[in-house]
Amino acid sequence: MRGTLAVAAREIAERKLLFLGAFVAGLLPLGFPLLPVLRGNAHGARSVAMFLLATDIVVAFPLVFGATILVGDIAQKRLAFYFSRPLPGASIWAGKLLAALLISIGCAILAAAPVFLLEGERAFSLATGGLDSRGLLVLTLPGVLLLFLLAHVVASMARLRSAWIVLDFFLAALFAVAITFSIRSLFFAGFWSFYEPWRSPVRSLWWPPVALIAILLAASCVQVADGRTDARRSHGALSATLWGLIAVFAAILGGLALWVAGGSWEVLLGGRR
Amino acid sequence: MSANPATAASASNASAAVVSASRLLVRYGGNPKPTLEEISFSVPRGSVYALLGRNGAGKSSLVRCLLGQQKSTSGRCTLFGSDSWKTRGRAMAKVGVVSEDPDAPPAMTARQLAAFFSRLYPAWSGASVFDRLRRFDVPTDTAFGILSKGQKALVSLALALGSAPDLLLLDDPTLGLDAVARAAFFDELVGELADRGTTVLLTSHDLAGVEKMADRVGILKGGRLVLDESLESLKARFRRLRYGNEATEDPASYGQELSAFEAVKVKVRGWGIDAVVSNYGDESFARFAALEGVVDAEASALSLEEIFVAVVGEASPAGKENA
């Protein structure tokens, strides 16, 4: 844990100017009332600007960090700096991931802070047209994590340039078709429940993306812990773990789809809602 | 390797060694020729082991395997008696590393790097780091990326020594440094060795610097460790022989007079024969000098650099594998 925090602190310190930049950007909407064209609806305009700015940050930052913060070090053979220290591979991975999450979310909060401090919670409802702002906030962390991991995996496959990429393309297409087909079958069978997921977690549409995040987390962790400074081995570890776990995930979904198609699931899981 | 008694002895002491490799094989991709093949050696506690080899000989791959940063195709490396791949995280607390290409994040200053390291090493001594940096006259608040190459090497050394390591692993640390920076680097190292007796594994092309401090030498050639023995024994058995040749009709050629020696390199000069032999002995030289046709024979000691060139450079037909 100590190592993870040390790595995260170092990564954050290297990018500390982003926090200042986000805060300064967040101050800009405060000047909207001064613009004649917005004078009539300055509250709404600055709330929308705050929301867009924060959304841009929580989308763009994890994508950029995912594509660079770990993959860049592996591709440019800079990870030896960490692997020459008393740091387990998992701590290096976790530290960099934690830094990316904290910078992405921290910058979004700082960008939203000036308008939020001025307008209060009204700023969110003005910006989102009354959507549940708490629900959006709850989605932010897994969303940032998912974007970071997806960008990391795609960038690893593209930048580490090993022969594994051929298998990656093939298996990505194969499993995308299989998983989409299973989810679609379950959807048309009325299996998915969108409300009260705690009543029937198996039927909740939340678990597939949560499982996907867990798979991506495991694959990227194994990639760093086992691949270390060897780019080819790193790509191999990522691909083997990722596609192995996705195969299990696809098999579970496919089995579920077949079972649901049999019709007896309604008795066991409480039927259609 | 196993034919060398010194190597056999070091292999038997591998479990007591600070760092060791056993039958190490490293192969990259589909390349049929391994980068490292059947490498076995060990570095005893308190010794200074110089691992030498030409560019591309496999030194950096070997260092990465020893540090547990890279998995070998087969074979095993140990650090402090444990498998370096499996126990790297713990073992690195007792290892100071200076890499060939200083790899610290370019935006960090020496002060920030020291603060970062202080959170990782239990035996960290920030005061000793700053004391060394002051002596080296290296700024502590300048970004690492804009320091000169010599300053980067000195910062890396100061940081590596800051954790009072039991093992110091230096991968060609003086590459590209000027004479003053090289001297400062080696002086500091010699001081550290005198003070603490730290075990050192060093790869370098600066053989004059290495010769002052190494007590054991390994030479990699084409992925194989062709030599592994103490510097003292190496310097005792290698000699340059110079003599006029009247044994053959053509004085610029040579015959059987060198057969008592293992000639690593033989050159025919205008004045006679210039040979490097790897099994010199005073008695065999006396017999050689008394041979009919051998005129004005003289034997001279070789520097480590001359031995290295003789072993890995272009060899005569007589001696390529005779080291």
Image: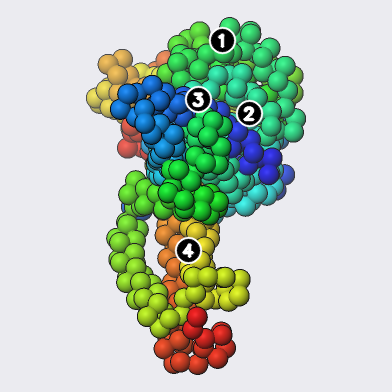
The foreground one among A185 and B322 is A185
Q: Which of A136/B278 is in front?
A: A136
Q: Which amino acid, mark 3?
A: Leu
| Residue at figure coordinates x 39%, y 26% from the top left | A32
Please tell me whether mark 1 or mark 3 is closer to you in this view. 3
Cβ atoms under marks 1 and 4 closer than 8 Å: no
The earlier-in-sequence mark between 2 and 1 is 2
Q: Chain of mark 2?
A: B
Q: CA distance from mark 4 to mark 3?
A: 33 Å
Answer yes or no: are tags 1 and 4 on the same subunit: no
Residue B179 appears in the picture as rendered: yes
- The residue singled out by tag 3 in the image is A20
Q: Secondary structure at mark 2?
A: helix
Q: Is residue B298 above or below residue A258?
A: above
* Residue ID for mark 2: B116
Assess whether mark 3 and mark 2 are in contact (beta carbons under 8 angstroms). Answer: no
Q: Crowding near pointer 3: few (<14 within 10 Å), some, many (20+)?
A: some
SS at mark 4?
helix
Q: Mark 4 sits on what residue?
A: A209
Secondary element type, mark 3: helix
Q: Amino acid at mark 4?
A: Pro
Judge from the rendering whether residue B214 lies leftward or rightward of residue B294; answer left or right.
Answer: right
Q: Amino acid at mark 2?
A: Phe
State the CA–CA distance, disc 1 to disc 4: 50 Å
Chain containing mark 3: A
Disc 2, disc 1: CB below 8 Å? no
Between the C-alphas of marks 2 and 4, the distance is 36 Å
Which residue appears at 70% of the width and 20% of the height? Answer: B126
